[in-house]
Image (cartoon, grey):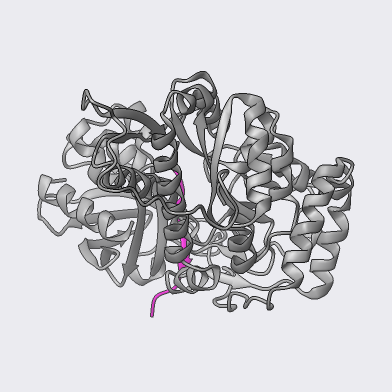
Amino acid sequence: MSRFIVALLGSALLAGVATACGSAAVEAIDPEGPVNPAGPTGVPVVLQIGTNDFPGRPAADQIQDLADRVAELSDDTIRLEPTWRVGWDEPDWDQYVAREVMSGALDLAIVPSRALPDLGVTRLRVLDAPFLIDSDPLLDAVVTSDVAQDVLGDLEDVGMVGLALIPEGLRHPFGFEEPLLGPEDYDGATIRAPQAQATDALFAALGATTSQADNNPAVHAAVEASFQLDFVSGMAATGNVTFYPKLGALVMNADAFDELTASQQELLRQAVVETLQWSIDTRQSDVEAAASFCEQGGTVALASEEALAGLREATQPVYADLEADPVVAADIATIRAMAAELDEAPLPEPCGQPVAGEQLGDDLAFTDDPSVINGVYRNEVIEEELRAAGVPEDQIEPNVGVWSNTFQDGEWWDQEVVMGTYELDGDLMRITYAGGGDPEIFRWELTDRGDLVLEIHELADDEWRAFLEVWVSEPWLRVADVD
């Protein structure tokens, strides 16, 4: 593989890839002239802010927006320095980020709210009550209400100040083969989801277990995720089953907050108010995100009223546990009252068809007809896996992320960029890159559900072996047909 092709792959990938200080808003500060909270020395206050996400993901975008606003409001006398991928390789990555704030290793962070009850912030459990916050209007109403201020107050007990709850998206089941509709689809299944007591309780009530392992259809029946996350594109989502929202709790180490002057604290709070509103205004709605998901080859199904009633009934033990705490029970009642005052929100439109396992597979003889594998296939290349495999540094960044590989009648492209051509010879596939050079040869096979399994057979240049071994280490998920 030539450097020209690596650059090409990188460009294709990049092309595809209520605050605690008030309720609805805080009065905007209106200083007479620029605020200079750094004091007479003129030395900027530098605060470290972190997330386990990386640029391009919602939490990272929110952090960058906040950092820009703080710099502008303070005339660059307060600076937020972002740190990405904090605790990325930890089994409880969300809780790890929160502990970094609690210890003072980070000054601020955005942490998924569902991770915080694991650390003793029990009132936040209301945000993860099953099927309670199930629409964008209700989500926006909650984060700008007194409920947000009240639940964030519990963070003081663990040495943090809660500044805001910032909405990211609604969480649905995304099946690898079929959509998960009623309770029977969860019984005995393993669901890929981040570590959290609330998540474990929800799926246990449905008869399922959770796993934090990388997405793998051989292990998981489904992924719990939002439409905004493109690594699930092409799977079969259930658009009207909303477990709960993903909310980012913007938290700060209490000692670090206390070290700020009153004007610095108010300036920070004002920036938070503006970032929260920006997030509400710019966030793609669930319906819009689902439509984009469909355009990328995904499937959206809707569960029947009977199936929805079955899911709610199965999760009643979770509510019994939550409502045993009278404070949480009152919060649940408040959110239900808020929901009753809102108009019914639109649901994602159904689209696509789940991949049928009998369409391709064991009955297919190996062939030299290239159209036999016609389709769109997705795979994800993870930076940590490349480093662990010893991939050279200059091959890592351009190739990390989600690949969308289309094979059609001997042509291969990623997104809209032509990558090269391929030919089949029995169980061998020869790929010739658009940049030229000798072909790479892989063994190929289709699984029963139509996913593409590749294995290195012969390489023209061993310089790329480490990368290619990671690239084909998992089956490529079949996400769409081609004409």
Residue 24 lies, with reference to residue 2, above or below; the image says below
Residue 318 lies, with reference to residue 451, above or below; the image says above
Residue 117 on the magenta span: no
Q: Can see residue 449?
A: yes
User: Is 217 positioned to the left or the right of 416 in the image?
Assistant: right
User: Which region shows up in magenta?
Assistant: 473-483
Question: Percent position (x, y) of residue 337?
Answer: 78, 65
Q: Can see residue 473?
A: no
Residue 479 on the magenta span: yes
User: Is 469 positioned to the left or the right of 259 in the image?
Assistant: left
> Quarter-wise, where is residue 474 in the image?
top left
Name the image quarter holding the C terminus: bottom left
> Quarter-wise, where is residue 1 in the image?
top left
User: Is 431 positioned to the left or the right of 308 in the image?
Assistant: left
Q: Residue at x 59, y 65 (%)?
A: 236
User: Is 369 positioned to the left or the right of 257 in the image?
Assistant: left
Question: Percent position (x, y) of residue 357?
Answer: 60, 64
> Quarter-wise, where is residue 135 in the image?
bottom right
Q: Residue at x 50, y 32 (%)?
A: 252
Of residues 438 and 208, the one nearer the viewer is: 208
Q: Residue at x 60, y 40 (%)?
A: 194
Question: Percent position (x, y) of residue 243?
Answer: 69, 56
Question: Percent position (x, y) of residue 448?
Answer: 57, 59
Residue 165 lies, with reference to residue 301, above or below; the image says above
Q: Residue at x 64, y 35 (%)?
A: 116
